[in-house]
Image (cartoon, grey):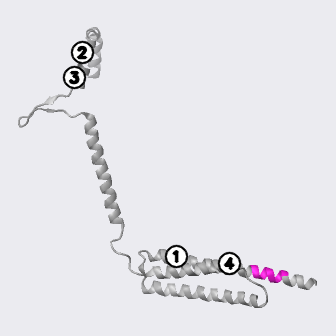
Amino acid sequence: MRDHLEKYILANKRELDVHRPSPQLWDRIYRDLATPVAIETPETEPIQQRRPFFTWKIAAAIAVIAFVSGGLFWKMTMQPLSPKPVTSHVENAQLHQMEAYYQTAIKAKQNQIRLFEQGGVQPDNALFFQLQRLQDLYQDLRKELPESQDPDVVVNAMMQNLTMQMEILNQQLMILEQIKSMTNEKDSRL
């Protein structure tokens, strides 16, 4: 079939090349495209054909409405309707164990610092100020825990707070040990 078509085109090439549209025909086509066409329907009066730009406006408006509706639907389905229940009995027991461990360790470190104070080595007050601020924040977190929608985040923050308190006390003890050893060296030289 293709060979037959090619043979026909080659045989009639001169006749096919003769017919070219005139420039007036192209002008008329452009003019007709620029003017709206009236479409008549049996029930109504003639209406003008809508231009492509108007169609794009409608499509964009529909896309925006669909996007906003989808976003609102997603937001509504992703947020819990009611707050999570407060931590279970097992989680409360683990929290109390964690608190007991850290509170015991913190008190032991504070007692060690008091021994240094009794020996005449004074601790850094700035570290105690930071420690007090962390303890106050810890109490705030403890109050927030029962009302929290995500108790795991609050418990994690509480644990980080206790860890920072331990680090501050360890730093304080390390500084006091250094001061004591420097003082002992100085005394032994005299």
Between 59 and 189, the residue placed more toward the observer is 189
Q: What's under tag 4, amino acid-wise?
A: Leu
**Magenta stretch, residue numbers:** 175-182
Q: Return the disc, 1 or 2, that comes first in the chain's sequence.
A: 2
Q: Spatial distance from mark 1 to mark 2, Cα to Cα? A: 79 Å
Give the structural element (helix, strand or loop) at label 3.
helix
Please tell me how crowded label 1 is: few (under 14), some (14-19), or many (20+) other residues with Cα within 10 Å.
Answer: few
Using a 10 Å C-alpha cutoff, classify the residue at mark 4 as few (fewer than 14 neighbours), some (14 to 19) or many (20 or more): some
Q: Quadrant of residue 102?
A: bottom right
Q: Nearer the viewer, mark 1 or mark 4?
A: 4
Q: Residues within 10 Å of mark 3 (few under 14, many from 20)?
A: few
Could you give the CA–CA distance between mark 1 and mark 4, rounded to whole angstroms?
23 Å
Disc 1 marks which amino acid? Asn
Question: Does residue 20 show up?
Answer: no
Question: The N terminus appears in which quarter of the rendering?
Answer: top left
Q: Which residue has dot 1 on it?
A: 156
Residue at mark 4? 127
Query: First in sequence: mark 4 or mark 2?
Result: 2
Mark 2 or 3, nearer chain start: 2
The residue wearing badge 2 is 25
- Kind of element beneath mark 2: helix
Drawn side of residue 85 relative to residue 134, left or right: left
Residue at image point 59% right, 87% down: 103
Q: Along the polypeptide, which appears first: circle 3 or circle 4?
A: 3
Mark sitting earlier along the chain (1/3): 3
